[in-house]
Amino acid sequence: MVLLRKTSIYHIKLSTLKMKVFLTIILCLTLFSCYDHLNEKVYKGKDFTVKWYSISTITTLDEYIDLEKYGNTENIMQCSNLPSIYDIVITGDTITIKTTTRVSISDLVAKKNGCVIKLDSTITMYQYMKKYHPEVAAEYIGDTIN
């Protein structure tokens, strides 16, 4: 009976150790996978640069747009629900951000460092899906909500 009890305690200690190692590995993977710029796209104007990228956190995938001018980089837009940003068009000193109508914007700066920023939210879900997920775009043809 004493042998059985020692074996049970050994198994409990071993399974506790395995659980700690497993949780440590998961925590490290989560921390290292977060906050990387994913799918970064760069658009250049005559004297400024616009970067559009995503950051993956544990529960969300947020999209950001940064404006870099004169060596300063500032976030001009952040949105939390996907799909949202469709495209960015630069004309002179005007930055037009094309989004779906389902976009939820946390913050948008209308003018920054001499650049005018416009938001065009006329993109339908069908247009968005056709560009980024053509294999399922047909499901959104009759989408009246946009």
Image: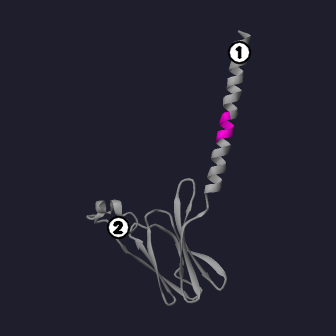
Q: Which residues are magenta?
A: 18-22
For numbered disc 1, what is the local secondary structure?
A: helix
Above or below: residue 51 compared with residue 60: below
Please provide percent x and percent y for residue 91.
47, 88
Above or below: residue 110 compared with residue 12: below
Q: Quadrant of residue 84?
A: bottom left
Q: Residue furthest front?
A: 135
Per the image, the residue denoted by label 1 is 5
Q: Residue furthest top?
A: 1
Residue at 52% over, 57% down: 60
Please provide percent x and percent y for residue 62.
53, 63
Q: Is residue 102 magenta?
A: no
Tag nearer the camera, 2 or 1: 2
Callout 1 amino acid: Arg
Per the image, the residue denoted by label 2 is 130
Residue at 71% over, 21% down: 9
User: Given contact means CB atoms under 8 Å apart, are the residues at marks 2 and 1 in contact?
Assistant: no
